[in-house]
């Protein structure tokens, strides 16, 4: 990754979301046809919406409250994705191992979003370039 983030696509959290949404898409291909307009649609939508909200937040960097609001929306979408993953494992559409792997990815994204929210000034200081490597993302023990 470049030293500076010049676009939302350069953010580690955005890249992690892309991996998650692709994994969810691949896994959900095997869901029953009867779930096409319910669980399949919901889990794909929520996992993809995380990235859309991050992109919108990036575009709102000049407005710190809007930036934080959009990041909060992204975090809500990752939590919704976790809900749908639990539904999928309960219905035995995915294995416990797949559930745990994807939930771990969601939680990691949630921690990164939490750090961005807490350190919003680092992103909204008016600069068009952000040095992401200077921002330490929260670990499991940080809250």
Image (spheres, rainbow, N blue to C red):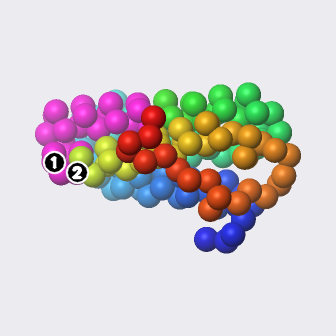
69 up-or-down from 17: above or below: above
Residue 124, image x, y percentages: 77, 42
* Left or right of residue 137, residue 81 in this image: left
Question: Which of the two residues, 82 or 84, is positioned nearer the viewer here?
Answer: 82
Residue 38 is covered by the magenta coloring: no
> At 71% across and 60% down in the image, what residue appears?
131
Circle count: 2
Q: Is residue 68 above or below residue 138?
A: above
Residue position for label 1: 95
At 32% from the left and 30% from the top, the residue drawn is: 83
Q: Nearer the viewer, residue 91 or 55?
A: 55
Question: Is residue 39 toward the left or the right of residue 95 in the image?
Answer: right
Residue 78 in sight from this viewpoint: yes
Disc 1 residue crowd, few under 14, some 14–19, many 20+, Cα 10 Å: few
Residue name at image x 57 percent, y 30 percent:
73
Could you tell me residue 34's position as x and y percent?
A: 25, 34
- Residue placed furthest toward the bottom: 2
Query: Front-most of 106 and 64?
Result: 64
- Asked whether the residues under the numbered discs 1 and 2 touch, taking CB atoms below 8 Å apart as contact, a structural biologist would say yes
User: How crowded is the residue under tag 2: few (<14 C-alpha within 10 Å), some, or many (20+)?
Assistant: some
Residue 96 sits inside the magenta stretch: yes
Secondary structure mainly formed by the magenta segment: helix
The answer to whether residue 2 is above or below residue 22 is below
Q: Residue 60 occupies which quadrant of the picture?
A: top right
**Mark 2 sits on what residue?**
98
Q: Nearer the viewer, residue 42 or 113?
A: 113
The part of the chain drawn in magenta is 78-99
């Amino acid at each position: 990754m470049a030293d500076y983030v010049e676009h939302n696509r350069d953010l580690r959290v955005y890249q992690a979301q892309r991996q998650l949404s692709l994994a969810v898409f691949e896994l959900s291909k095997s869901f029953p046809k009867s779930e096409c307009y319910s669980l399949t649609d919901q889990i794909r939508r929520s996992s993809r919406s995380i990235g859309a909200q991050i992109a919108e937040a990036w575009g709102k960097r000049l407005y710190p409250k809007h930036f934080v609001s959009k990041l909060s929306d992204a975090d809500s979408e990752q939590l919704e994705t976790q809900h749908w993953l639990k539904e999928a494992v309960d219905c035995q559409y995915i294995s416990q191992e797949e559930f745990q792997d994807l939930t771990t990815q969601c939680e990691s994204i949630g921690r990164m979003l939490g750090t961005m929210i807490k350190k919003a000034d680092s992103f909204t200081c008016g600069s068009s370039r952000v040095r992401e490597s200077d921002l330490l993302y929260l670990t499991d023990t940080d809250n």
